[in-house]
Image: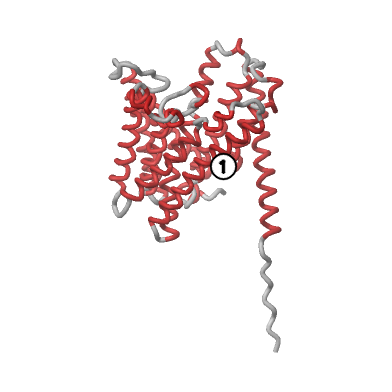
Amino acid sequence: MPDLRRQASGSRRAYIDWARGIAVIVMMEAHTLDAWTRAASRHTRLFADAQILGGFAAPLFLWLAGVGVVLSAARTTERRGSRTAAVDALCRRGLEIFLLAFLFRLQSFVLSPGTPPALIFRVDILNVMGPAIVGAALIWGVVSGARSTPRLVAAYAAVAAAIALATPIVRGAAFVDALPIWCQWYVRPAGDYTVFTLFPWAGFVFAGAACGALLVAAPGRSRERRLHAWLGCAGLVLVAIGFYTATQPSLYSHSSFWTTSPTYFAIRVGAMMAGLSATYAIAALLARAGIAVPALERMGRSSLFVYWIHVELVYGYASWLWHSRLPLWGTSIAFAIFSLLMYQTIVLRDGIVNAWRRRTRPITPEPQAVTA
């Protein structure tokens, strides 16, 4: 039977890896749908619904990164006995992710001849995730401490709300025009040079960190179970509030529900809160039934690896024969096959890494028997 303690309250919560695995699958669905579906199939209701589903991949990755910031900080502090060491490790991790964003774009530039060199500096999800992780780590370092959970949750929630509420204002602010052009790309969309911007996307990291702070403060199976019951209910309430406010006159002169609206930000955060609680409940039920889902957990642990290799395969020359040429049902089949291939790639990578570790691991000589 799977270790329920590990799934419910262990040092690594398996259900969070499940959630990451779901985010990976939704991400691949979104990208294959965008890259491979023909124009004639893009005007159907089914395609629009699939796009909405795919739109949850990026916020889910960012939100779970925020959850991971606080969980990782707590683990590092417990292991090393130093909050400073935890903040330092997380800041370095955020910086690594930020630098990986440019390395990823450099790879795309090399593998896709004819790409404008300026696209190396394109703002994508890793460009947003890295700085946001650094910011969340610094807040944790300043606010965390004995009995600091309410203050930490309030700080993260306040930053997330401020980013969401400021997004429509910042997008049209005149001061943005005075920034260097590459800095402008991080603040407001600039065509092909921005896929994501700090406003509102960084807000998901801080919203996730608030949830992570609550998880850290609820050790033990029963307390975490009660927390998820409340978290799921709070998420549904947030979704309801978001839909209600979306029907009211906007407070902003220029705002789009699908891109800059704080109401849609709230809806997505609420849906992810409820979704994580549902994932926890399903994981617990399957564990009691002795059912394990290692593939989904493994996919979640390899989310960065899958992101790194799959984008070029989906949008690059490897699949150019069927770019924008498949009907929706054809894209669905291709997506399923592609997902299986990505999982097998993870298995192959893990096998190679484990074999290399066994070869390079120092051999400890066996103690010789003492003779009389």
Identity of the residue drawn at 52% across and 41% down: 99
Residue 266 position by quadrant: top left
Give 107 or 32, whichever is nearer the viewer. Answer: 107
User: Which of the image's four quarters has the C terminus?
Assistant: bottom right
* Residue farthest toward the bottom in the current orientation of the protein: 372
Give 272 or 97, whichever is nearer the viewer. Answer: 97
Q: Position of residue 237 (x, y in %)?
A: 33, 29
Identity of the residue drawn at 47% across and 44% down: 94
Q: Which residue in the structure is indicated by mark 1? A: 297
Q: Position of residue 60 (x, y in %)?
A: 47, 33
Residue 366 showing in the rendered view:
yes
**Amino acid beneath label 1:** Glu
Q: Position of residue 126 (x, y in %)?
A: 50, 36
Residue 240 showing in the rendered view:
no
Give 218 or 40, whichever is nearer the viewer. Answer: 40
Left or right of 47, for residue 165: left
Dot 1: element? helix
Left or right of 83, for residue 51: right
The crowd level at tag 1 (other Cα within 10 Å; few <14, some 14-19, many 20+) is some
Colour scheme shown: secondary structure
- Number of marks: 1
Give 104 or 27, whichever is nearer the viewer. Answer: 104
Q: Position of residue 321 (x, y in %)?
A: 71, 21
